[in-house]
Image (cartoon, grey):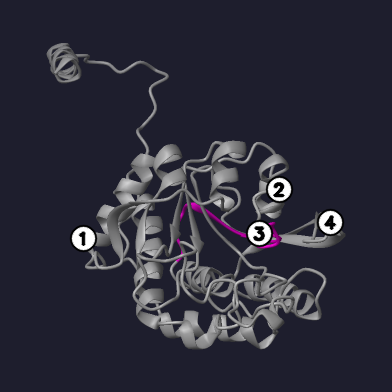
């Protein structure tokens, strides 16, 4: 009530005090952004981007698939009109051995001050430690969903940004070495190594954005995107806006209001190290022993788990968030 009363008082003062001659240093207010149509997200195109990643095989750092996929991602974003930075850094594997890893940053309108951050991880896990077949625990997984799906969605977002340009900055950051952590809880910082590196040394000095949306495991059938714990803690307003918009667009069967457990994921370090309010869209099914899909960290995480309906829902929500932000309606 106090805010409302103060607003009325200020409005009364403003309109009640006529000023015939504006001061010489007055500037014209910035014109509102042009209204644009929100482009339709093409789930089939996103699926093809996932399929291409899977064709490289496992993309765990140090593997031939990792290097080949890295080069393809960089070339693909350049073809889509982005300014691309390959941020190399040293990470460690499950045995503590150091290896070379790369965060890939694709920026649209890098000169713009108003920016939105979109992110996912592009590496796949070096072991299938939750596979029912214990003899395959030491084999790297394909990661169609866990790694591939978020990247596929963001590549399609990049394609839409190229064909439907807006006068606002968008940074797509693909983090490396997210999925090389210890599952026994002894070393929580072994996860999300790329996000930790970028959070401390971003691709641009003092980088900031209005908000961020992180994608992880967004491609499986009938996903449950609940309101994840760290997102609630660090970016509650952004989370509420994204989920309300998704539900208003008809995707409430996926974007549910359930309060789900916090997940140590890349968004945690974006929030803590860069102070950019960032939410995580991540599938956390009900009645799951691991908290994730049954294909998580198994050799079942192939193209067969990907559903274009899920890709459509997530991709359309992400692209609508970006364009509504540009039009100052988000």
Return the mark for residue 200: none
Is 310 left, or right, of 171 in this rendering? left
Marker disc for residue 248: 1
Q: Residues within 10 Å of mark 1 (few under 14, many from 20)?
A: few
Q: Give the answer, above or below, for where 238 lies relative to 42.
A: above
**Discs 2, 4 touching: Cβ within 8 Å:** no
Residue 5, given in percent of the width and then of the height, sits at: 13, 15
Residue 233 rendering spot, x and y as whole percentages: 42, 38
Q: Residue at x 41, y 62 (%)?
A: 284
Task: Check if residue 166 falls in the magenta segment.
Answer: yes
Vertical placement of residue 300 versus 171, above or below: below
Above/below status of 101 relative to 309: above
Q: Tag on residue 187?
A: 2
Distance between the alpha carbons at the discs numbered 4 and 3 = 15 Å
User: In the shown orientation, is residue 13 left or right of residue 228?
Assistant: left
What residue is shown at x 27% (from left), y 56% (from top)? 245
Which residue is disc 3 drawn over?
A: 178
Pointer 4 local density, CA inside 10 Å: few below 14, some 14–19, many at least 20: few
Residue 141 visible at all: yes
The stretch in magenta equals 165-183
Residue 255 falls in image quadrant? bottom left
Which comes before the other along the chain, label 2 or label 1? Answer: 2
Depth check, mark 3 against mark 2: the one in front is 2
Q: CA distance from mark 1 to mark 3?
A: 32 Å
């Amino acid at each position: 009530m106090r805010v409302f009363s103060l607003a009325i008082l200020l409005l009364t003062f403003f309109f009640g005090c006529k000023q015939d001659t504006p001061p010489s240093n007055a500037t014209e207010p910035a014109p509102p952004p042009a209204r644009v149509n929100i482009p339709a997200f093409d789930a089939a195109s996103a699926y093809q981007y996932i399929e291409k990643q899977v064709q490289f095989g496992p993309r765990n750092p140090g593997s031939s698939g990792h290097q080949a996929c890295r080069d393809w991602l960089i070339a693909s974003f350049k073809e889509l009109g982005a300014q691309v930075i390959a941020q190399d850094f040293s990470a460690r594997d499950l045995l503590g051995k150091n290896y070379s890893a790369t965060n890939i940053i694709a920026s649209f309108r890098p000169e713009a001050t108003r920016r939105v951050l979109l992110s996912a991880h592009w590496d796949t896990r070096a072991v299938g430690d939750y596979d029912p077949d214990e003899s395959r625990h030491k084999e790297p997984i394909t990661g169609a969903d866990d790694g591939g799906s978020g990247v596929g969605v963001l590549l399609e977002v990049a394609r839409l940004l190229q064909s439907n340009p807006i006068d606002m900055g968008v940074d797509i950051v693909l983090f490396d070495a997210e999925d090389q952590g210890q599952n026994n809880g002894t070393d929580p910082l072994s996860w999300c190594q790329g996000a930790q590196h970028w959070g401390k040394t971003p691709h641009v000095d003092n980088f900031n954005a209005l908000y961020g949306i992180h994608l992880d495991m967004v491609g499986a059938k009938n996903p449950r995107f609940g309101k994840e714990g760290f997102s609630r803690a660090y970016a509650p307003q952004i989370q509420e806006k994204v989920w309300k918009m998704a539900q208003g667009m008809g995707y409430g069967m996926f974007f549910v209001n359930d309060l789900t457990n916090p997940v140590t994921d890349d968004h945690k370090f974006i929030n803590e190290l860069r102070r950019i309010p960032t939410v995580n869209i991540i599938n956390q099914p009900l009645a799951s022993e691991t908290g994730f899909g049954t294909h998580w960290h198994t050799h079942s995480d192939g193209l067969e788990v990907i559903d274009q309906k899920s890709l459509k829902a997530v991709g359309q929500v992400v692209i609508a968030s970006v364009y509504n932000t540009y039009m100052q309606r988000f």
